[in-house]
Amino acid sequence: MPRGGSQFFGVDRDPMARMSEASSAYLAIGIAMVSVSFASIFIKWSESPPFIIAAYRLGFTCLLLLPLMIWTKGFSEVRRFTRKEMMLVVLSGVALTFHFELWIVSLSMTLVATSVILVTSHPLFVAAVSHFLLKEEVKRVAIVGIVIAFGGVVVLYAGDYSSGGESLLGDLLAFVGGLFAGIYFLSGRVARQTIGVVPYAFSVYALSSVLLFLSAAIAGDALAVSDGREIGLFLLMALIPTILGHTMFNYALKKVPAHIISTSVLGEPVGASVLAYLLLPNEVPTVWVIAGGALVIVGLYLVLALGYGPAVRQDEVLD
Protein backbone atom coordinates (compact mmCIF):
# COMPACT_ATOMS: atom_id res chain seq x y z
CA MET A 1 0.00 0.00 0.00
CA PRO A 2 1.36 3.49 -0.83
CA ARG A 3 2.57 5.64 2.02
CA GLY A 4 -0.31 7.50 3.62
CA GLY A 5 -2.73 5.54 1.45
CA SER A 6 -5.53 4.71 3.89
CA GLN A 7 -5.07 7.34 6.55
CA PHE A 8 -6.19 10.94 6.75
CA PHE A 9 -2.85 12.27 7.99
CA GLY A 10 -0.69 9.30 6.95
CA VAL A 11 -1.17 7.44 10.28
CA ASP A 12 -3.86 5.26 11.79
CA ARG A 13 -4.32 7.42 14.86
CA ASP A 14 -6.58 9.99 13.21
CA PRO A 15 -10.34 9.47 13.81
CA MET A 16 -11.23 10.06 10.15
CA ALA A 17 -9.14 7.02 9.20
CA ARG A 18 -11.94 4.92 10.68
CA MET A 19 -14.57 6.42 8.41
CA SER A 20 -15.21 5.05 4.95
CA GLU A 21 -12.98 6.62 2.34
CA ALA A 22 -15.93 8.09 0.43
CA SER A 23 -17.54 9.59 3.53
CA SER A 24 -14.36 11.24 4.77
CA ALA A 25 -13.56 12.54 1.28
CA TYR A 26 -16.98 14.10 0.73
CA LEU A 27 -16.85 15.65 4.20
CA ALA A 28 -13.46 17.16 3.29
CA ILE A 29 -14.83 18.47 -0.01
CA GLY A 30 -17.78 20.11 1.73
CA ILE A 31 -15.52 21.81 4.26
CA ALA A 32 -13.16 22.92 1.49
CA MET A 33 -15.89 24.42 -0.70
CA VAL A 34 -17.10 26.66 2.10
CA SER A 35 -13.61 27.55 3.32
CA VAL A 36 -12.01 28.62 0.03
CA SER A 37 -14.84 31.08 -0.58
CA PHE A 38 -13.47 33.27 2.22
CA ALA A 39 -10.02 33.71 0.64
CA SER A 40 -10.85 36.66 -1.61
CA ILE A 41 -12.68 38.44 1.23
CA PHE A 42 -9.71 38.23 3.61
CA ILE A 43 -7.38 39.35 0.82
CA LYS A 44 -9.56 42.36 0.00
CA TRP A 45 -9.59 43.33 3.70
CA SER A 46 -5.79 43.19 3.90
CA GLU A 47 -3.73 46.31 3.18
CA SER A 48 -0.45 44.44 2.64
CA PRO A 49 1.22 43.99 -0.77
CA PRO A 50 0.06 40.91 -2.73
CA PHE A 51 3.30 38.90 -2.39
CA ILE A 52 3.43 39.56 1.35
CA ILE A 53 -0.17 38.39 1.75
CA ALA A 54 0.51 35.10 -0.02
CA ALA A 55 3.89 34.53 1.65
CA TYR A 56 2.58 35.04 5.18
CA ARG A 57 -0.56 33.04 4.42
CA LEU A 58 1.48 29.97 3.51
CA GLY A 59 4.15 30.61 6.14
CA PHE A 60 1.54 30.66 8.91
CA THR A 61 -0.08 27.58 7.36
CA CYS A 62 3.21 25.71 7.78
CA LEU A 63 3.43 26.83 11.41
CA LEU A 64 -0.10 25.55 12.06
CA LEU A 65 0.71 22.24 10.36
CA LEU A 66 4.02 21.81 12.20
CA PRO A 67 2.53 19.98 15.23
CA LEU A 68 0.85 17.50 12.86
CA MET A 69 4.11 17.01 10.98
CA ILE A 70 5.84 16.13 14.26
CA TRP A 71 2.97 13.97 15.58
CA THR A 72 2.61 11.96 12.36
CA LYS A 73 6.38 11.69 11.75
CA GLY A 74 5.89 13.62 8.54
CA PHE A 75 9.52 14.73 8.32
CA SER A 76 10.58 11.09 8.15
CA GLU A 77 8.31 10.63 5.14
CA VAL A 78 9.71 13.75 3.50
CA ARG A 79 13.23 12.31 3.82
CA ARG A 80 12.00 9.17 2.03
CA PHE A 81 10.62 11.05 -0.98
CA THR A 82 11.68 9.45 -4.25
CA ARG A 83 13.09 11.62 -7.02
CA LYS A 84 9.74 11.53 -8.81
CA GLU A 85 7.86 12.53 -5.66
CA MET A 86 10.27 15.38 -5.01
CA MET A 87 9.85 16.66 -8.56
CA LEU A 88 6.06 16.58 -8.16
CA VAL A 89 6.28 18.51 -4.89
CA VAL A 90 8.53 21.12 -6.52
CA LEU A 91 6.16 21.42 -9.49
CA SER A 92 3.18 21.85 -7.16
CA GLY A 93 5.02 24.45 -5.07
CA VAL A 94 6.10 26.52 -8.06
CA ALA A 95 2.64 26.33 -9.62
CA LEU A 96 0.97 27.35 -6.35
CA THR A 97 3.37 30.31 -6.09
CA PHE A 98 2.43 31.66 -9.52
CA HIS A 99 -1.25 30.94 -8.86
CA PHE A 100 -1.27 33.06 -5.70
CA GLU A 101 0.89 35.84 -7.15
CA LEU A 102 -1.26 36.33 -10.23
CA TRP A 103 -4.63 35.86 -8.55
CA ILE A 104 -4.01 38.11 -5.55
CA VAL A 105 -2.76 40.91 -7.82
CA SER A 106 -5.86 40.47 -10.00
CA LEU A 107 -8.14 41.08 -7.01
CA SER A 108 -6.91 44.68 -6.85
CA MET A 109 -7.78 45.24 -10.51
CA THR A 110 -11.18 43.65 -11.04
CA LEU A 111 -14.30 42.52 -9.17
CA VAL A 112 -14.07 39.57 -6.78
CA ALA A 113 -16.77 37.77 -8.78
CA THR A 114 -14.90 38.19 -12.08
CA SER A 115 -11.52 37.25 -10.62
CA VAL A 116 -12.74 34.14 -8.80
CA ILE A 117 -14.74 32.87 -11.78
CA LEU A 118 -11.71 33.21 -14.08
CA VAL A 119 -9.22 31.75 -11.61
CA THR A 120 -11.44 28.68 -11.14
CA SER A 121 -11.67 28.00 -14.89
CA HIS A 122 -8.61 25.75 -14.55
CA PRO A 123 -10.63 22.50 -14.82
CA LEU A 124 -10.85 23.13 -18.58
CA PHE A 125 -7.07 22.96 -18.73
CA VAL A 126 -7.11 19.92 -16.43
CA ALA A 127 -9.56 18.17 -18.75
CA ALA A 128 -7.30 18.68 -21.77
CA VAL A 129 -4.15 17.52 -19.97
CA SER A 130 -5.96 14.54 -18.45
CA HIS A 131 -7.07 13.45 -21.89
CA PHE A 132 -3.75 13.80 -23.71
CA LEU A 133 -1.31 12.99 -20.91
CA LEU A 134 -3.24 10.73 -18.54
CA LYS A 135 -5.10 9.03 -21.42
CA GLU A 136 -8.56 9.62 -19.97
CA GLU A 137 -11.56 9.72 -22.26
CA VAL A 138 -13.19 13.15 -22.69
CA LYS A 139 -16.64 12.79 -24.19
CA ARG A 140 -18.33 14.97 -26.79
CA VAL A 141 -20.36 16.69 -24.11
CA ALA A 142 -17.06 17.95 -22.70
CA ILE A 143 -16.28 19.69 -25.99
CA VAL A 144 -19.65 21.43 -25.81
CA GLY A 145 -18.90 22.42 -22.22
CA ILE A 146 -15.51 23.87 -23.15
CA VAL A 147 -17.10 25.99 -25.89
CA ILE A 148 -19.78 27.25 -23.49
CA ALA A 149 -17.28 28.00 -20.72
CA PHE A 150 -14.91 29.92 -22.94
CA GLY A 151 -17.93 31.77 -24.31
CA GLY A 152 -18.52 32.85 -20.73
CA VAL A 153 -14.92 34.04 -20.48
CA VAL A 154 -15.45 36.14 -23.61
CA VAL A 155 -18.58 37.67 -22.03
CA LEU A 156 -16.60 38.54 -18.88
CA TYR A 157 -13.89 40.22 -20.97
CA ALA A 158 -16.50 42.09 -23.02
CA GLY A 159 -18.06 43.46 -19.85
CA ASP A 160 -14.73 44.68 -18.47
CA TYR A 161 -13.66 46.18 -21.81
CA SER A 162 -15.74 49.28 -21.06
CA SER A 163 -14.02 49.60 -17.65
CA GLY A 164 -10.58 50.15 -19.18
CA GLY A 165 -7.24 48.40 -19.31
CA GLU A 166 -6.82 47.71 -15.59
CA SER A 167 -9.92 45.50 -15.39
CA LEU A 168 -8.84 43.62 -18.51
CA LEU A 169 -5.36 43.08 -17.11
CA GLY A 170 -6.87 41.86 -13.84
CA ASP A 171 -9.01 39.39 -15.79
CA LEU A 172 -5.97 38.12 -17.71
CA LEU A 173 -3.94 37.67 -14.51
CA ALA A 174 -6.79 35.75 -12.89
CA PHE A 175 -7.15 33.48 -15.92
CA VAL A 176 -3.42 32.67 -16.11
CA GLY A 177 -3.46 32.16 -12.35
CA GLY A 178 -6.16 29.58 -12.97
CA LEU A 179 -3.90 27.72 -15.40
CA PHE A 180 -1.24 27.45 -12.72
CA ALA A 181 -3.90 26.19 -10.31
CA GLY A 182 -4.62 23.46 -12.85
CA ILE A 183 -0.96 22.42 -12.83
CA TYR A 184 -1.07 22.44 -9.02
CA PHE A 185 -4.08 20.08 -8.98
CA LEU A 186 -2.69 17.78 -11.68
CA SER A 187 0.66 17.31 -9.98
CA GLY A 188 -1.05 16.92 -6.62
CA ARG A 189 -3.37 14.29 -8.07
CA VAL A 190 -0.37 12.16 -9.01
CA ALA A 191 1.71 12.90 -5.91
CA ARG A 192 -1.08 12.07 -3.48
CA GLN A 193 -1.16 8.46 -4.70
CA THR A 194 2.00 7.78 -2.69
CA ILE A 195 2.48 10.75 -0.33
CA GLY A 196 0.47 11.41 2.84
CA VAL A 197 -1.57 14.61 2.81
CA VAL A 198 0.27 16.44 5.63
CA PRO A 199 3.85 15.81 4.36
CA TYR A 200 2.73 16.72 0.85
CA ALA A 201 0.87 19.88 1.86
CA PHE A 202 3.57 21.03 4.29
CA SER A 203 6.33 20.58 1.70
CA VAL A 204 4.40 22.37 -1.05
CA TYR A 205 3.32 25.26 1.19
CA ALA A 206 6.83 25.69 2.64
CA LEU A 207 8.47 25.84 -0.80
CA SER A 208 5.83 28.24 -2.09
CA SER A 209 6.17 30.48 0.98
CA VAL A 210 9.94 30.78 0.47
CA LEU A 211 9.46 31.62 -3.22
CA LEU A 212 6.83 34.22 -2.36
CA PHE A 213 9.09 35.89 0.21
CA LEU A 214 11.83 36.03 -2.45
CA SER A 215 9.34 37.60 -4.88
CA ALA A 216 8.35 40.15 -2.25
CA ALA A 217 12.01 41.03 -1.63
CA ILE A 218 12.65 41.45 -5.36
CA ALA A 219 9.56 43.66 -5.62
CA GLY A 220 10.92 45.86 -2.83
CA ASP A 221 8.21 45.03 -0.29
CA ALA A 222 8.98 45.32 3.42
CA LEU A 223 9.16 41.71 4.61
CA ALA A 224 8.42 42.37 8.29
CA VAL A 225 4.75 42.88 9.24
CA SER A 226 3.92 44.01 12.77
CA ASP A 227 0.37 45.30 12.43
CA GLY A 228 -1.91 43.14 14.57
CA ARG A 229 -4.85 43.38 12.19
CA GLU A 230 -2.76 42.17 9.26
CA ILE A 231 -1.29 39.30 11.30
CA GLY A 232 -4.82 38.29 12.28
CA LEU A 233 -5.93 38.27 8.64
CA PHE A 234 -2.90 36.19 7.64
CA LEU A 235 -3.78 33.64 10.34
CA LEU A 236 -7.38 33.52 9.13
CA MET A 237 -6.15 32.95 5.56
CA ALA A 238 -3.89 30.16 6.77
CA LEU A 239 -6.55 28.42 8.84
CA ILE A 240 -9.72 28.77 6.76
CA PRO A 241 -9.06 28.87 2.99
CA THR A 242 -5.68 27.06 3.16
CA ILE A 243 -5.82 24.35 5.83
CA LEU A 244 -9.60 23.87 5.72
CA GLY A 245 -9.70 24.61 1.98
CA HIS A 246 -6.62 23.65 -0.06
CA THR A 247 -5.50 20.91 2.31
CA MET A 248 -8.94 19.29 2.38
CA PHE A 249 -8.98 19.25 -1.41
CA ASN A 250 -5.50 17.69 -1.37
CA TYR A 251 -6.76 15.03 1.02
CA ALA A 252 -9.76 14.21 -1.16
CA LEU A 253 -7.59 13.93 -4.30
CA LYS A 254 -6.48 10.54 -3.00
CA LYS A 255 -9.96 9.22 -2.27
CA VAL A 256 -12.36 10.22 -5.07
CA PRO A 257 -12.10 10.79 -8.84
CA ALA A 258 -10.44 14.04 -9.84
CA HIS A 259 -13.50 15.33 -11.68
CA ILE A 260 -15.37 15.38 -8.36
CA ILE A 261 -12.70 17.65 -6.89
CA SER A 262 -12.64 19.88 -9.95
CA THR A 263 -16.41 20.23 -10.02
CA SER A 264 -16.50 21.10 -6.33
CA VAL A 265 -14.16 24.04 -6.97
CA LEU A 266 -17.05 25.62 -8.86
CA GLY A 267 -18.62 26.41 -5.51
CA GLU A 268 -15.94 29.06 -4.90
CA PRO A 269 -17.16 31.68 -7.41
CA VAL A 270 -20.69 31.41 -6.06
CA GLY A 271 -19.65 31.55 -2.41
CA ALA A 272 -17.10 34.31 -2.95
CA SER A 273 -19.53 36.46 -4.94
CA VAL A 274 -22.22 36.14 -2.26
CA LEU A 275 -19.73 36.96 0.52
CA ALA A 276 -18.34 39.91 -1.47
CA TYR A 277 -21.84 41.32 -2.00
CA LEU A 278 -22.58 40.99 1.72
CA LEU A 279 -19.22 42.07 3.18
CA LEU A 280 -17.46 44.36 0.68
CA PRO A 281 -18.49 47.79 -0.64
CA ASN A 282 -18.87 48.36 -4.39
CA GLU A 283 -18.87 44.64 -5.15
CA VAL A 284 -22.28 44.36 -6.82
CA PRO A 285 -21.91 41.97 -9.80
CA THR A 286 -22.81 43.51 -13.16
CA VAL A 287 -25.10 41.87 -15.70
CA TRP A 288 -21.98 40.90 -17.68
CA VAL A 289 -20.49 39.16 -14.66
CA ILE A 290 -23.70 37.29 -13.89
CA ALA A 291 -24.22 36.20 -17.50
CA GLY A 292 -20.59 35.28 -18.14
CA GLY A 293 -20.26 33.56 -14.79
CA ALA A 294 -23.36 31.48 -15.44
CA LEU A 295 -21.95 30.32 -18.79
CA VAL A 296 -18.60 29.43 -17.22
CA ILE A 297 -20.25 27.41 -14.46
CA VAL A 298 -22.56 25.59 -16.89
CA GLY A 299 -19.65 24.80 -19.21
CA LEU A 300 -17.44 23.58 -16.40
CA TYR A 301 -20.23 21.39 -15.07
CA LEU A 302 -20.68 19.73 -18.46
CA VAL A 303 -16.92 19.15 -18.79
CA LEU A 304 -16.34 17.80 -15.31
CA ALA A 305 -19.56 16.11 -14.26
CA LEU A 306 -20.43 14.55 -17.62
CA GLY A 307 -17.37 14.82 -19.83
CA TYR A 308 -14.74 12.59 -18.23
CA GLY A 309 -14.23 8.96 -19.06
CA PRO A 310 -13.11 6.41 -16.48
CA ALA A 311 -9.89 7.26 -14.73
CA VAL A 312 -6.74 5.25 -15.28
CA ARG A 313 -4.04 4.47 -12.77
CA GLN A 314 -1.44 7.23 -12.55
CA ASP A 315 1.53 4.88 -12.24
CA GLU A 316 0.62 3.19 -15.52
CA VAL A 317 0.95 6.35 -17.59
CA LEU A 318 3.45 8.62 -15.84
CA ASP A 319 6.31 6.32 -14.78
Image (cartoon, helix red, strand yellow):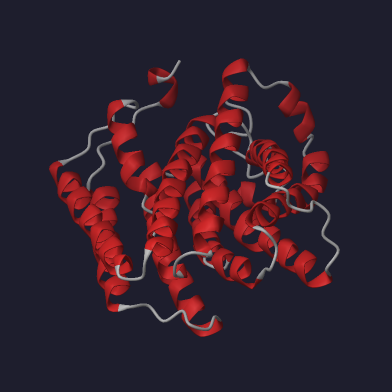
Q: How many labels sit on residues?
A: 0
Q: Is residue 267 visible?
A: no
In terms of depth relative to the viewer, which is nearer, 123 or 244?
123
Q: Is residue 282 left or right of residue 228?
A: left
Q: In this view, does 107 lie above or below 88?
A: below
Q: In this view, does 165 lie to the left or right of 96?
A: left
Where is residue 130? Give x, y as percent: 33, 33
Report which quarter residue 186 is drawn in: top left
Q: In which quarter of the image is the C terminus?
A: top left
In terms of depth relative to the viewer, which is nearer, 170 or 275?
170
Residue drawn at (31%, 40%) of the image: 127
Residue drawn at (67%, 62%) of the image: 237
Where is residue 133? Give x, y as percent: 33, 25
Residue drawn at (20%, 52%) of the image: 145
In terms of depth relative to the viewer, which is nearer, 184 or 282?
282
Q: Is residue 45 left or right of residue 230?
A: left
Report which quarter residue 111 is drawn in: bottom left
Residue drawn at (38%, 57%) of the image: 118
Q: Is residue 296 visible?
A: yes
Q: Quadrant of the N terminus?
A: top right
Q: In this view, does 226 lie above or below 5?
A: below
Where is residue 253? Give x, y as percent: 49, 42
